[in-house]
Image (cartoon, helix red, strand yellow):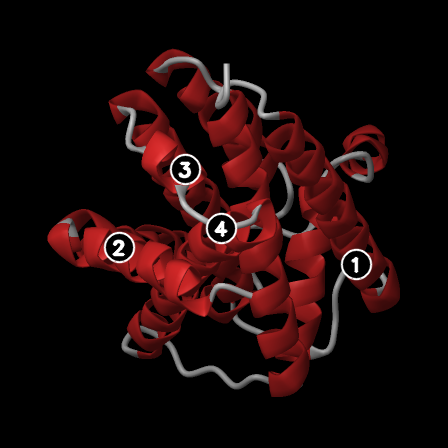
Amino acid sequence: MNYYAVRAIYLHEMHRMWRTIFQSIMSPVISTSLYFIVFGSVIGRMIPLIDDTSYAQFIIPGLLMLTLLTQSISNSAFGIFFPKYSGSIYEVLAAPISSFEIILGFVGASATKSLIVGAIILITASFFVEYSIQYPFLMLFLLVLTCLTFSLFGFLIGLLSNNFEQLQVVPLIIITPLVFLGGSLYTIEMLPDFWQKVSYFNPVVYLINGMRYSFYGASDINIYVSVISLVGFLVICIFGVAVVITKGYNIKS
């Protein structure tokens, strides 16, 4: 293992976060605050308790997952796309470093950024509502697993993208609608029967409900199903990234 090379890639990506501090840190804080002001305070007054929790408490896991998914994908996708776009990726490929070490550096940095943002969201939420985490170790496990999984997914998107338009297609057209339709701000039991059945085909439903279970011990989906779904998607992402980066698609051509 070339630890120096992995460390160089990791630190370079982390430095990029501090160079764009407003976009990386302040944006999640502002958006989370607005969600609590609009949904938690205003709309929450008109919604009764959900599983013995107030609406403001109920939306915390959903907001956390909503931000983690989008941040992990965008951080990792842009992290590998810009070296491709500028040509600096060839310096990495020419170095004595394996594909695994390249992935470890880029994806590790992206996952770390997402974990920092996740911690900031939890701290920000504490200023608006009191909450407790019933299963903190399960929450931490899901947090890390989600960051790693979707950082890998974003890395795959960055590898396959040829331009900025392709880079934005999946996050904007697919991920964002799935997150909002995945019960991030509501329980799927509120939906009509037909849409409840449709929701079970949305993979984000399982992720959000897994996180919600770790907070309050209750969710619409069995926790084991949620964890298995997340691990399964992680395996798919690992396989996809391994195949693409080994073949050198869109990189070595």
Residue sitting at x 41%, y 22%: 168
Closer to the eye: label 4 or 2? 4
Closer to the eye: label 2 or 1? 2
Between discs 3 and 2, the one toward the N terminus: 2
Closer to the eye: label 3 or 1? 3
Q: Residue 41, can we see it?
A: no
Q: Percent position (x, y) of residue 248? A: 58, 25
- Which residue does the numbered mark 1 point to in the structure image? 226
Q: Secondary structure at mark 2?
A: helix
Relative horizontal placement of residue 43, taking residue 197 as reference (left or right): left
Quadrant of the rendered structure where residue 18 is? bottom left
Q: Are marks 1 and 4 in contact (CB under 8 Å)?
A: no
Between discs 1 and 4, the one toward the N terminus: 4
Residue sitting at x 60%, y 85%: 136
- Which residue does the numbered mark 4 point to in the structure image? 97
Kindly identify the amino acid type of the residue bearing the numbered disc 1. Ser
Mark 4 → mark 2, Cα distance in angstroms? 16 Å
Residue 94 is labelled as 3
Residue 12 is labelled as 2
Q: Residues within 10 Å of mark 3 (few under 14, many from 20)?
A: few
Relative horizontal placement of residue 16, taking residue 111 as reference (left or right): left
Answer above or below: position of 106 versus 137.
above
Kindly identify the amino acid type of the residue bearing the numbered disc 2. His
Kindly identify the amino acid type of the residue bearing the numbered disc 3. Ala
